[in-house]
Amino acid sequence: MADTSKLFSDKSDLYAQARPQYPAELFDFIKSLPVKTETVWDCATGNGQAALGLAQVFDRVYATDISEQQIANRLDVENVEFSVAPAEQTGFADNMFDLVNVAQALHWFDFEQFWPEVRRVLKPGGAFICYGYAWFSVTPEIDALVESEVEAVVAPYWAPQNQLAIDGYKDVVFPFEKIDVPEIDLIIHWTFDQFMDFLHSWSATRRCMDDKGSGFFEQAHVKIKQAWGDPKIAKRASSPLMIIAGYPDIS
């Protein structure tokens, strides 16, 4: 298994700057779940992109990540308590949370240890939700360049766990019956530099750079910039959110 603490400690400041925040519609759905909104565990919070929205729903958000550097670059959110801890073993009390939330991270966990921890810390009747995104679409021309100049080059450098997310977690066995979830798109408006920072924040991009150098990315930068036009103009980028939710049996 990839050492995720090292993988996401590298360029954690770039990750904080480049990774998108989640749409209000997602947190409206979370708010509609038949659970109390007192406490939530945002597991593998990264810099707190999801914690920011959860803080608008729950009285208290407990956000953990295995990377000290990610937590050090956290967003400033008033009612969120950030701490460093692995997903599979926390110091939280039994039956502490109304919801366990995982954003863009489930594929990194040891499921044999993680699911028992979820059951342990959830209150009776508590819910679990995970969500994430894969590829963003900007324009057909830019999408094609990203695919040929970045995605195809870095593809061998994705950790095996990334494929679980790319495949929509279809090979993950969830220990609960899934519930119906809405179709929600993650939409963000990026300038050219912001978009390139996002591509740079991919773990596979960074690993490819470490192995082959940054020449491929510099070449992609030139070609995508030409297709972009005025780099200061923000363009709409969208990706469908993959959402899975349910009520683990903790009896």
Image (spheres, rainbow, N blue to C red):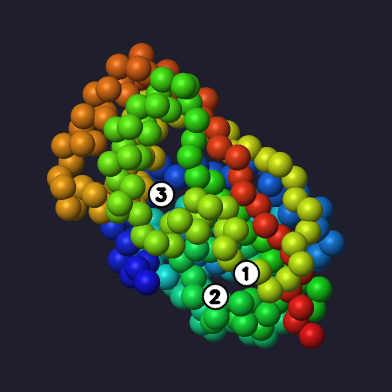
For the residues labelled 1 and 3, the Cα–Cα distance comes to 30 Å
Dot 1: within a 10 Å radius of its alpha carbon, few (fewer than 14), some, or many (20 or more) residues? few
Amino acid beneath label 1: Val
Amino acid beneath label 3: Ala
In percent of width and height, residue 82 lies at: 50, 66
Q: Residue at x 54, y 75 (%)?
A: 111
* Disc with the residue nearer the chain's start (2 vs 1): 2
Which residue position is annotated with label 2?
111
**Where is the N terminus found, in terms of image quarters?**
bottom left
Q: Is residue 205 left or right of residue 88?
A: left
Asked if the residue under mark 1 is in contact with the one under mark 2, i.e. CB atoms within 8 Å, the reply is yes
For the residues labelled 3 and 2, the Cα–Cα distance comes to 26 Å
In percent of width and height, residue 247 lies at: 76, 69
Task: Name the front one of labels 3 and 2.
Answer: 2
Amino acid beneath label 2: Phe
Quarter of image, res 150: top left
* Disc with the residue nearer the chain's start (1 vs 3): 3
Q: Is residue 162 left or right of residue 13?
A: right
